[in-house]
Structure formats: C-alpha cells, structure tokens
C-alpha cells in the first residue's frame, strides 16, 4: 500500500468511527445484529464484521460497567480515574463510552478549565480536591493535577520550583488519597506523531469538530518533542505502587476504548448487586379529575 493509499484509508477509518459514535447512541436495545443494515458505510464485509464485533464487545463491557456502578454505590466505594494524554489521543472518547449508560449521580466527569487568578494563589491540589468522590461515587478526571507536569511545564505556566514541588508532593498526595479509602487509577493515552497529525487535520476540516481545537492544541503540536520529554519525566517520577500509571496504546480508537474499559473493570473485585423486583403500581383514577387542555400558543411547532 502506498503512503497516499494508507493516508486515505486512515482518514476513512476516522470518518467511520465518527459515524459509529452516533450509532452507539441510536442502538438503544444494544442489539447490534438488529442494526446491521444501519452500518451503511465501509469498504467490505470484513470491515462491517469488525465494526459489529466492536459494538458487541462495547455493549458487553458497558453492561459490566453498570454492574460496577451498582457495586460502587452499594458498597460505598470511592473511585478516582485520571485520563491523561496528548491532545486528540482519545481521552474524551473513552470517557464518553464509560459514562454513556451510567447514572451521573454515581459516575461524574470533571474537566476543569484553566485556573483563575484566585485559584492560582491556592494550594495547587485545592481545586481538584473539592471534586473528589464521597462514598458510593466514581469521579473521572478529563485531565487532572498532572497538568502541571505536562502543559504547564511545556508552556512555561509554572516555575522550576513549582514544577519540582509538584513532583515532591504528588506521590504523597496520591498515597494520602489511597490511605483515605479512595481507589486511584491513572491512564495515559499514547498516540504516535503521525496519528496526532492526522487527527488534527480531521478536526480542522470537520465543522463539527473544530471546537475541539484551541490555540493551545496547535501549539502543543509544534512542541511535540517537549511534550514527549515532559511525559517521560512524569511517568518516571509519579509511577508509584499505590497509584501506578497504565499506558493505553491509542492509535486505533476502538481498540483503545475496549482495552481501557476492560482493564478498568479488571481493577475491581466487584459483583452484581441483586435488585428487588420492581412492580409498577396501578394508576389511581378519580372520577372528578379533569385534564385541562394545553394552550396552543405554548406548544412547540411540529416542524418534523
């Protein structure tokens, strides 16, 4: 396969992935076989077969995530999961698949913006600590306190002293979380230079994805090697027994999602929580009840 043919194939794969993302939400009965005609795009039967296999395994894993969620809530567990990686590495995609079928009261996502002037004067971990879980909760950080080891270091948003203090503090901070009963998981999504370049081009030319690109993202592309050095230092200095790093190869988005979710589930000795049988009560009917008509001027027009 020539370089151009390979590039076209990878672009097509990315477009199909976007299409399948919508199908994941549409297939509410989680029966991919019944929705096989909806696949629509794809070069060969083998391509479609692979996508069907992805759907089946994703839905199976999501069913296990529901069991995990119920167990976390019932047993009053406290869980923190950090998702880190380069821009366009697929962190948001796996977080979306994890939370897609879960109760937001049990499993919530934290994606903090840049610190404001007041937060910059606080203890560094303070704004993250306010989002830590109570009993029966799972918190997924879409980027985390490791911003200091990555973007802040590379872009010069912290001093050398602040950078070194972070590495002195973060192992103890995470050990303290673990001692307090919080399970801490840390995932780094790893993509190649070439793959990030392709995904950035996809975002530039897709109006529905352009919002994902910020000036900081584009600058991170230019400073690829600086980010690599920062990542290597971060993994070396913060990989601790109590909260180790797990690296997810993410050039293939679908495989990365499945591998990450499978690994996440393997980190818990959860069991299915038995629910009491639910019986729908009969609706009360009162002979004097009269339902009033809704005023026509407040009804949403039936455009479709």
Image (tube, rainbow, N blue to C red):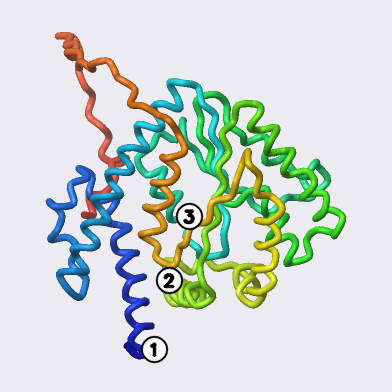
Name the residue rendered at 75%, 62% in the picture.
Answer: 153
Name the residue rendered at 70%, 41% in the picture.
Answer: 127
Name the residue rendered at 57%, 55% in the picture.
Answer: 84
Quick check: 59 above or below 78?
below
Name the residue rendered at 35%, 90% in the picture.
Answer: 2
Q: Which of marks 3 and 1 is in front?
A: 1
Asked if the residues shown at circle 3 and circle 1 are in contact, with their CB atoms under 8 angstroms apart, the answer is no
* C-alpha separation, residue under disc 2 versus residue under disc 3: 18 Å
Residue 223 coordinates in the image, percent (x, y)? 67, 74
* C-alpha separation, residue under disc 3 versus residue under disc 1: 29 Å
Quick check: 186 above or below 4?
above
| Residue at which label 3 appears | 92
Residue 295 coordinates in the image, percent (x, y)? 27, 35
The quadrant the N terminus occupies is: bottom left
| Residue at which label 1 appears | 3
Q: Nearer the viewer, mark 2 or mark 3?
A: 3
Quick check: 189 above or below 118?
below
| Residue at which label 2 appears | 207
Element assignment for label 3: helix
Element assignment for label 2: loop
For the residue carrying disc 3, how many other residues have a C-alpha within 10 Å: few (<14), some (14-19), or many (20+)? some
Who comes first in sequence, dot 2 or dot 1? 1
């Amino acid at each position: 396969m020539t370089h151009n043919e390979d590039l076209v194939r990878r672009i097509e794969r990315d477009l199909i992935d976007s299409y399948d993302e919508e199908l994941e939400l549409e297939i509410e009965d989680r029966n991919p076989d019944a929705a096989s005609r909806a696949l629509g795009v794809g070069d060969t039967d083998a391509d479609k077969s692979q996508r069907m296999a992805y759907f089946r395994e994703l839905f199976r894993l999501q069913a296990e995530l529901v069991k995990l969620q119920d167990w976390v809530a019932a047993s009053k567990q406290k869980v923190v999961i950090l998702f880190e990686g380069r821009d366009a590495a697929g962190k948001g995609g796996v977080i979306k698949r994890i939370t897609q079928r879960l109760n937001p009261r049990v499993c919530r996502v934290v994606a903090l913006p840049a610190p404001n002037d007041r937060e910059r004067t606080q203890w560094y971990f303070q704004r993250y600590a306010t989002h830590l879980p109570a009993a029966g909760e799972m918190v997924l950080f879409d980027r985390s306190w490791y911003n200091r080891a990555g973007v802040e270091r590379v872009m010069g948003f912290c001093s050398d002293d602040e950078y070194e203090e972070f590495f002195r503090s973060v192992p103890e901070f995470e050990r303290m979380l673990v001692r307090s009963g919080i399970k801490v998981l840390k995932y780094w999504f790893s993509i190649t230079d070439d793959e990030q370049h392709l995904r950035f081009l996809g975002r530039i030319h897709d109006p529905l994805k352009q919002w994902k690109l910020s000036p900081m993202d584009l600058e991170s592309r230019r400073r690829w090697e600086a980010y690599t050095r920062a990542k290597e230092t971060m993994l070396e200095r913060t990989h601790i027994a109590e909260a180790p790093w797990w690296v997810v190869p993410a050039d293939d988005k679908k495989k990365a999602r499945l591998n990450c979710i499978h690994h996440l589930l393997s980190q818990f000795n959860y069991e299915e929580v038995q629910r009491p049988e639910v019986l729908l009560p009969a609706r009360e009917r009162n002979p004097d009840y009269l339902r009033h008509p809704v005023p026509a001027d407040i009804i949403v027009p039936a455009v479709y």
